[in-house]
Image (spheres, helix red, strand yellow):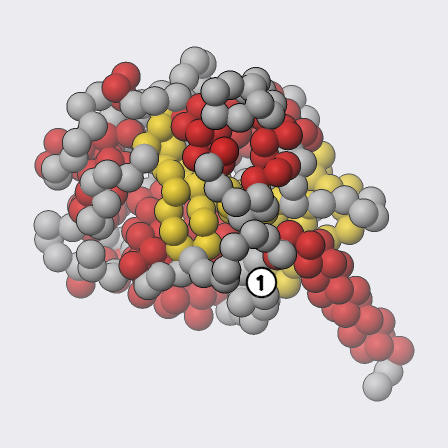
């Protein structure tokens, strides 16, 4: 073994060791081993990978890998919560808790949200009828065992910022930061570019991203833009039933062609990765933290002892795409 190979292998060992140390304590949470208790927050509006992520999330729940505690929408498009509710309903969970962002937040047109909401059944009548997502997350967290919940975000971080800023209430005498620290095991965030750059989920509400990431008290794993950018899924949905809202969304978005799988990677890692189940898919880089500016631009900064990490490419993207699309195709 030459010197260069020894250095590379040593670096891999250090990265793996840092990741193990980062999540070792977090893995010891209350209760018996079982499905990952998960809160899912999405900007289901612009890109269609949010829909793919919802389909994947429900497939994992159907397989007993995830227990979905709540879902939330972090954008102001009035059709987005109804679209998410229609997806939850299609997958057999019409009673799923669903919150929406309250106050200023990102907004844009959607190619699919209105049509999915109008063409598929759901219970939610309007976005205004849904509770404040930050308060809903607070309510759910208060009722969970300590260090048991995984948070997964695939959009702007407005709801997470708002959660951190909540104060004591009837559910808990803890403030937002303290409640998160007690109840959350880890946060998996689809956001950022690594080692530095600009990415939509952080840029579209830069102040919220900067605040949430700076003040979040538990480990954060980032699935950056570069992770999902080469993982192409969606064309396989031609095999899905015509009355599938997942198929319909992709049909409206791009005619059932492949699309990048940014959001699906975060959900998959939140369900399977924190205990090392996806070690063959991605490496994990630790030993630093993500600095986010007020404009949402980001840069990784080396610093020992921090709780941030990010995924690094490992498995060929086509192989990961096959796993993700297989889950997206599962029927209710």
For the point 59% across and 53% down, the residue is 29
Residue 179 percent across, percent down from the top left? 59, 31
Please tell me in which quadrant of the rendered image residue 135 appears: top left
| Residue situated furthest top in the rendering | 103
Name the quadrant of the N terminus.
bottom right
Residue 288 percent across, percent down from the top left? 76, 46
| Residue situated furthest bottom in the rendering | 1
Q: Nearer the viewer, residue 243 or 250?
A: 243
| Residue situated furthest right in the rendering | 3
Name the quadrant of the C terminus.
bottom left
For the point 25% across and 60% down, the residue is 329
Left or right? Give the position of 108 relative to 262: left
Q: Nearer the viewer, residue 322 or 274?
A: 274
132, above or below 184, in the image = above
Left or right? Give the position of 126 relative to 243: right
Residue 160 seen in the current view: yes
Residue 209 percent across, percent down from the top left? 58, 28
How packed is label 1: few (under 14 Cα within 10 Å), some, or many (20 or more)? Answer: some
Left or right? Give the position of 30 relative to 48: right
31, above or below 17, in the image = above
All told, the count of numbered labels is 1
Q: Which residue is mark 1?
A: 275
- Which element carries disc 1, helix, strand or loop? loop
72, above or below 226, in the image = above
For the point 73% across and 42% down, the residue is 289
Residue 43 percent across, percent down from the top left? 39, 33
318, above or below 128, in the image = below
Left or right? Give the position of 58 relative to 240: right
Residue 265 seen in the current view: no
């Amino acid at each position: 073994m030459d010197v260069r190979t020894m250095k590379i292998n040593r670096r891999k060992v250090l990265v793996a060791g840092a990741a193990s140390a980062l999540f070792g304590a977090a893995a010891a949470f209350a209760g018996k081993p079982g499905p990952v208790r998960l809160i899912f927050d999405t900007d289901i509006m612009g890109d269609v990978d949010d829909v793919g992520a919802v389909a994947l999330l429900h497939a994992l729940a159907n397989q007993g890998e995830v227990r979905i505690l709540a879902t939330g929408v972090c954008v102001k498009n009035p059709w987005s919560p109804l679209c998410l509710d229609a997806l939850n309903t299609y997958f057999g969970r019409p009673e799923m808790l669903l919150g929406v962002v309250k106050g200023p937040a990102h907004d844009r047109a959607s190619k699919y949200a209105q049509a999915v909401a109008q063409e598929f059944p759901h219970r939610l009548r309007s976005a205004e009828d849904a509770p404040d997502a930050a308060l809903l997350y607070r309510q759910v967290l208060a009722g969970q065992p300590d260090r048991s919940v995984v948070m997964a975000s695939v959009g702007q971080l407005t709801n997470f910022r708002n959660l951190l800023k909540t104060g004591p209430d009837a559910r808990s005498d803890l403030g937002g930061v303290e409640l998160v620290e007690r109840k959350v095991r880890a946060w998996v965030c689809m956001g950022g570019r690594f080692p530095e750059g600009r990415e939509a989920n952080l840029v579209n509400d830069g102040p919220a991203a900067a605040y949430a990431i700076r003040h979040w008290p538990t480990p954060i794993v980032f699935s950056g833009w570069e992770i999902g950018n080469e993982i192409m899924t969606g064309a396989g949905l031609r095999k899905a039933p015509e009355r599938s809202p997942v198929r319909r969304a992709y049909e409206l978005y791009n005619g059932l062609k492949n699309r990048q799988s940014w959001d699906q990677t975060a959900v998959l890692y939140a369900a399977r990765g924190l205990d090392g189940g996806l070690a063959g898919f991605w490496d994990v880089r630790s030993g630093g933290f993500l600095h986010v500016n007020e404009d949402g631009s980001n840069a990784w900064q080396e610093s020992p002892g921090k709780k941030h990490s990010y995924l690094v490419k490992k498995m060929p993207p086509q192989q990961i795409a096959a796993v993700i699309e297989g889950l997206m195709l599962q029927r209710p």
